[in-house]
Amino acid sequence: MKRAYNFNAGPSALPFEVLEKAQKEFTNFQESGMSIMEFSHRSKEYDAVHEKAITDLRELLHIPNDYHVLFLQGGASLQFSMVPLNFLSPSRTADYVLTGVWSEKAQDEAEKIGKTTTIASSQHQNYTFIPNMTDIKPSHDSAYVHLTSNNTIYGTEWKHYPTLDVPLIADMSSDILSKEIDINQFSMIYAGAQKNLGPAGVTVVIIKDELLKNSTENIPTMLNYKIHAKKNSLYNTPPTFSIYMLSLMLEWVKNQGGIPAIEARNNEKAALIYNCMDESNGFYTGHAQKDSRSNMNIVFKLPTEELTNKFIAKSKELGFIGLSGHRSVGGCRASTYNAVPYESCEALVTFMKAFMSEN
Ligand code: PMP
């Protein structure tokens, strides 16, 4: 079977090995005569899957003991509300760095709950860059600073993170596990799974005790991080199948050599495509400024809209999936998450070169 050249922005490509393993175990998990989906979330079999996912994520990201790992539902979008509900008290301001539509949405939700401010933004230049580190200055009454580490729509990515004396909270939905990070710089990280972590359905939250300690008490149970932490994400029924798939993904990352090996490969994959753009004499132009380029979402356009449309139509004929840009930016976008093979990127570059010489 020939696999598609899948450049979807999310849900996106999964490793073939992971899909095969899930298929093999699908109807008969560990010789139980049952699918993992049919087990109680309180069973010892499911518990082993749940604990392995936590342990492997801790190991891969070097998560210190004073952080909890939670598996929640509602996507990254629910985190936009849960963060201010838990951490924004009436006497404080929540600081947001705007680097794209997802950061705007995060701030919009917080604004419904309390006072927020935008402390840095690249909105005035159509989100083509990540603001300077020196511009990240928290408010005097800051509850936390929120940023989006990778901007899925605009193709920009933070290369370093500010070290602050207030809690730093990051939406890492589209670049978690793609490169090494120092967890200690963050009080909280969250990510919807459907890019680098597996299928949709589970949201990973990594949260420091110190932040949790001061969270708001009187909020709905299902929106309360403290409850989920206390119950090890088993207050209610978790998305057991998505967590099982996450555990297979984490095992796959470990088998690839862990995050350093994944990061090196991601660098090579992105460089292949960016080099093709840079050597095209302006035929392919990137949306992001060079020093803010994302290794996960490569956003570019062709000289005219007509050529862009022709490029996308032709790509579909050749078996490429997901190369249309997001409707708010237009152009093209190639998402090169962890599971996208190097060979898919090579095939894309071969196509880009051929298309350029024919047009
Ligand atoms: N944040 C980022 C950076 C995203 O890319 C997305 C979705 N693509 C979201 C948040 C929203 O995630 P969800 O659909 O899981 O709510």
Image: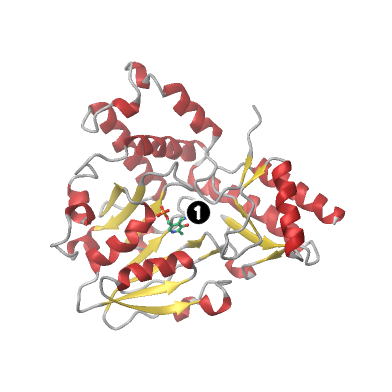
Q: Quick one: 62 or 267, which is closer to the camera?
A: 267
Above or below 317: residue 47? above
State the image quarter where residue 171 is shown. Answer: bottom left
Which residue is at a point 59% across and 43% down the rendered structure image? Answer: 340
Whole-percent x and y of residue 125?
57, 77
* Residue 351 can be seen in this image: yes
- 29 left or right of 337 in image: left
Instruction: Decide: is 16 above or below 261.
Output: above
Residue at the (34%, 27%) spot, across then down: 36
Which x, y percent locates residue 180?
Answer: 47, 54
Residue farthest to the bottom? Answer: 140
Q: Name the residue under label 1.
A: 179
Coloration mode = secondary structure
Estimate the x, y position of residue 74 in percent, counting from the top left: 33, 51
Amino acid residing under circle 1: Lys
Quadrant containing the N terminus is top right
Q: Which of 354 and 255 is in front in this view?
A: 354
Q: Determine the quadrant in which ligand 1 lies.
A: bottom left
Residue positioned 79% across, 62% down in the render:
280
Whether residue 136 appears in this view of the structure is no
At mark 1, the secondary structure is loop
Q: Where is residue 303 in the image (x, y as percent from the top left)?
A: 77, 66
Residue 106: image quadrant is: bottom left
Reply above or below: 174 against 98.
above
Is 57 on the left-hand or right-hand side of 319? left
